[in-house]
Image (tube, grey):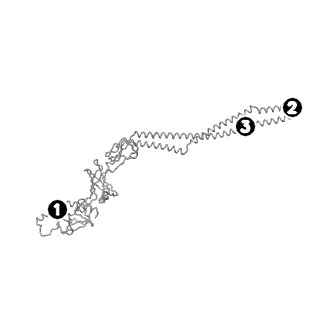
Amino acid sequence: MTESMTESKKKKRGKKHRKLPIIIAVIVVGFIVFRAAGGMGTATVGAYVTTASAVRGDLQESISTSGTVLSEEKKVIFAPVSGTLAEVNVEAGDVVKAGELLIGYDMDKMEKTLRQSALQLEKSMAGYDGAIAKDSQNQADLNEASVNLRVLNQQIADNKAYLKELQNSLSQNQRDTSNALAAENFTLQERLGTLTPGTAEYNEVSGAIAQNSYLQQIANSTDYVAQMQKEIEDVQERIAGYEEYKARMESQKASSEAGIMNSFDKTQYDADHELASLSYQAAEEEYYIAKKGITAEFDAIVTECSAIPGAGVSGGMQLLTLESSRNLKVSFDASKYDIEKLALGQKAEVTISGRTYEGQVSKINRMAVRNASNTPMVGVEIHLADPDDNIILGMDAKLCIYTKKAENVLLIPVEAVNADKEGDFLYVVENGTVARRAIVCGISSDALVEVKEGLSEEDKIIVSALTNVEEGMAVTVLE
């Protein structure tokens, strides 16, 4: 016999004791009637017992217990953004409707924070744009200086070559002219020394000498040298100008090269700009989130509230707990005897504050938890089909859970069933004596037990007796 059945039998025996005074009264009355009718003969009278017969019928097994009303939908609300709370419109125990404003933020402070982020972004953008513009200018200056330096170097080289050519030409021309004329005059002077003065030939040679002297004077004249020197000075002046411009271009190249951003500088500017942009976007999002405030997502009851008006909160801080007032359940702990009878979907009758509601087994935990008496208990939940506003969270509820049902089965009173280590049994009356009959029980209610094996409708089942009955004992039946 299982422990569940043992527990059931203990309950049944308790009921049997409560009925004992009535049974005794019935037997006493019967005994008096029997005596009055002359039943005090010499025959031996056995123990008086009451009997009943098994009947066929339908039986609904149920479990009666109690539980606590809870919500099936629970929402813990955290601060969506950091800020200061301006208003808190609820407290623990309040009923709220979906969409109702629960908490509002101080939007003046949120606007200041948003403005600060906007200014920081503007500053970052200005710095970024300035750096890009300066980098572009430096790149243009570098390109200009590089091109100009190539041209200047060529111009300087060309003009220096031309200057050298001028200087060489002037020197060479002067040397060549003077040497030729001097050599020719030397020859003419020697020839003149051999001629007679006054002769035509003498005069011709003398004229030639004079002509050469004139030509030598022209070659060495100041005007000719000045003209050549001026050309040389002009070239030298151009070279100096080119050199000066080259120095400026070299300086421009050096400074522009130093000012051009490298890949690391570009990455830093890009990162700073992106960070400022992200910071502004986050501040803008937080502003509009705070502007909406915190509202109820569903019809609910506020079961916890730690929010305080004027308090500063950080994102993620717990503020409220909402529990649905529409999706409700009754939770209870089932013993190991009851848990084997329970199954998902079973109907239940739930009584809360004098009102009755329909329910259904919606959850059976897969883990047992030991209670204060170290007894393993399994959590079970009953979903309420149609709760109303009269139900209060945390209230006690009485439960009647309809488990198994048997139709057209053999039924006997629970008082007739006994149990020992060999199993369930009962006593029947056979030929005026007590006989033990082993039976196999099925489901049971408070009053009846299903018998699957070991009994027929004709058997007279002993329900109660004035004394303990034993197998083989003679009895007198009081129907």
Say which element carries label 3: helix
Q: Amino acid at mark 2?
A: Tyr
Q: Amino acid at mark 3?
A: Gln
Q: CA distance from mark 1 to mark 3?
A: 160 Å
Identify residue for label 3: 167
Identify residue for label 1: 24
Q: Name the image quarter holding the C terminus.
A: bottom left
Number of disc labels: 3
Q: Judge depth for marks 1 and 3 and give the one in front.
A: 1
Q: CA distance from mark 2 to mark 3?
A: 40 Å
- Name the residue at 69% across, 39% down: 160
Q: Judge depth for marks 2 and 3 and give the one in front.
A: 3
Q: Quadrant of residue 374?
A: bottom left
Identify residue for label 2: 202
Residue 35 shows in the view: yes
Asked if 117 appears above or below 393 in the picture, the reply is above
- Residue 70 picture location, percent across and down: 31, 51
